[in-house]
Amino acid sequence: MTAAKYDVLGIGNAIFDVLVQTDEGFLSRHGMTKGGMSLIDEPRAAAIYRDMGSATEMSGGSAANTIVGIASLGARAAYVGKVKDDQIGRLYAHDIRAAGIAFETRPAASGPATGCSYILVTPDGERTMNTYLGAAQDLTPDDIDAEQIAASAIVYLEGYLWDPKSAKEAFVKAATIAHGAGRQVALTLSDSFCVDRYRGEFLELMRNKTVDLVFANESELHSLYQTSDFDTALKQLRSDIGLGVVTRSEKGCVVASKDGVTAVPAFPIAKLVDTTGAGDLFAAGFLFGLAREVGHENSGRLGALAAAEVIQHIGARPQVSLKELARQNGLPV
Amino acid sequence: MTAAKYDVLGIGNAIFDVLVQTDEGFLSRHGMTKGGMSLIDEPRAAAIYRDMGSATEMSGGSAANTIVGIASLGARAAYVGKVKDDQIGRLYAHDIRAAGIAFETRPAASGPATGCSYILVTPDGERTMNTYLGAAQDLTPDDIDAEQIAASAIVYLEGYLWDPKSAKEAFVKAATIAHGAGRQVALTLSDSFCVDRYRGEFLELMRNKTVDLVFANESELHSLYQTSDFDTALKQLRSDIGLGVVTRSEKGCVVASKDGVTAVPAFPIAKLVDTTGAGDLFAAGFLFGLAREVGHENSGRLGALAAAEVIQHIGARPQVSLKELARQNGLPV
């Protein structure tokens, strides 16, 4: 196995975020399930957007947010995701490259526009996402560069990739190449409704060792094993995968491996503003720690710190250097 | 004179803001004059953007920001400005309408893209703007709806309109219609370099009573009268126009009319984050007060409050209801 060129390569749906702070009434008027991610078609996107207030826009996408966090911590990172060659797609490509990330996926020249998520942030800080996949639907196995995958110590995949038709083939191709090159493959379950759509397939990915590490939050874990008992679910997770990391919001996280279970507390925050990106940035810190081999506890702390930064402002990308922040907090970077 | 349908109608360059926090080195590397607004062409826009970090995007434009602030205070407002019918233009149109503002200007179907400003915010909170006018160049007198102008108690124009070729004709047409209907016309001098480009024309607009009220900050005032002495400049301003309002950053503002000069202190802030929109939001508060006839001092206080809100976060549009904020601070709304 040759030395890795990238610490982490992420593959995901490239989505531009359109964020607005709103009241609970907006969610009920539009029949939205609070806290979830719903896939929407163009007419529904138009209807929601028409009713939304003035927004702030920025690049998003779950795995992309994670990769940006990893780069902000100082690691070498790459991203694979599909935008269209339109104005928003060009903003997207700029932002991820400006964060120091290798991004070579060819944009779609035709077909649907760059994907957008209409994100409603309620006064309690919870975010409710409505995602129009757009060009992200067109990610195919051809977008997977075998050489780049083999040159990445960890390949990180989002469960959301199971939604677009051919992206899951790209996912499996990447995982196969990574394992062939002796690399690690990580998966985030993304969303409890996403787990509900693809429960059997996600369990199969874990059990047949297509993935080595799984990130889940509590509701995704409960959805995966269809149980409301945390310990039961955690026990099943430990039997299904070598390394599982479960985030529990203000209760911190639990890292479950064959060796045992380590609990890491959440990082204290001054004020919760917007949970968008909380899980993505937790994964960033944890994967960075894993790549630097600083141990599960330190990796969990790095995840908690990165998540704490991102939930104290609007938007899913860090607003400060996470490397600096980690240093100030005595964490290994 | 019939009752006004709109308290304030603003006309300006419709510009989408691309904001990034950066260091002083970026400005010097790109030969930028800190604190100013420079017009840039497409190649320079591309060169600056290529070197910029990950950005946050939101609708901007000086007069548009003011109009959004006025609507946030609870007044009826309208906006005239030219975007293209492209992705960014549609985001722009959405945002201004979502703020409750009448916006009927037909977007350009062809020609340059919607205008963008690349805004660099340095650690001291100062903003340096690089504006590609794009479709804003195509605002013409045909975009001025006589009926709408005549139905607006105050017509507010930005000095930046002197940059695009035919926008100044639109400006003069609007002012003429407004005065014909017995309405007031206000002008902001926009930027000291803008004043330097059009000093003679701006003075002529004031002296021939095309405008009734002028907003300027200290450097614009000094540029207008080519003097470094504030009192000399203020005296000249008073002889040239019925009502002049000069903003002085943390020193507050001075309202100069035939009757006398009133100084109003700045509103205290916790932390200066980004001065983008400070002058725009000051004008919003002042014009709102003028429309509601609450007196110069209260108008100045409303301006100071709105400016204080906008400089404590990234971006030039208010993030809270200014009406609520004014109420909480005992100001008349």
Image (cartoon, coloured by chain):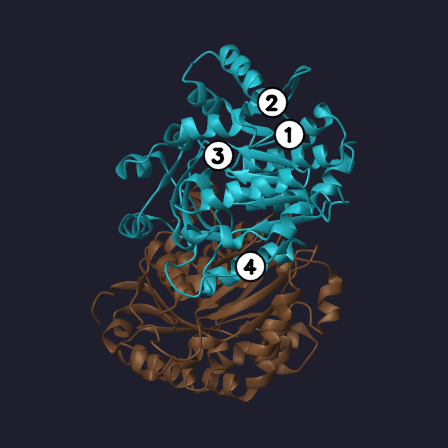
Chain colours: A brown, B cyan
* Pointer 3 chain: B
| Image coords of residue A284 (percent x, y) | 45, 60
Which secondary structure lies at badge 1?
helix
Which secondary structure lies at badge 2?
strand
Which residue carries the number 2 mark?
Answer: B253
Task: Name the mark on residue A221.
Answer: none
Q: CA distance from mark 1 to mark 3?
A: 17 Å
Among numbered discs 2 and 3, the one appearing first in the sequence:
3
Among numbered discs 3 and 4, the one appearing first in the sequence:
4
Discs 2 and 1 share one subunit: yes
| Image coords of residue A315 (percent x, y) | 54, 56
Which residue carries the number 1 mark?
Answer: B304
| Image quadrant in which the N terminus of chain A is located | bottom left
User: Would you identify the image quadrant in which residue B105 lies?
Assistant: bottom right
* Pointer 4 chain: B
Q: Considering depth in this image, is A3 or B244 the residue closer to the camera?
A: B244
* Pointer 1 chain: B
Q: CA distance from mark 2 to mark 3?
A: 16 Å
Discs 1 and 3 share one subunit: yes
Q: Please identify, in this view, whether the residue under mark 1 or under mark 3 is nearer the observer.
A: 3
Q: Amino acid at mark 4?
A: Ala
Which residue carries the number 4 mark?
Answer: B93
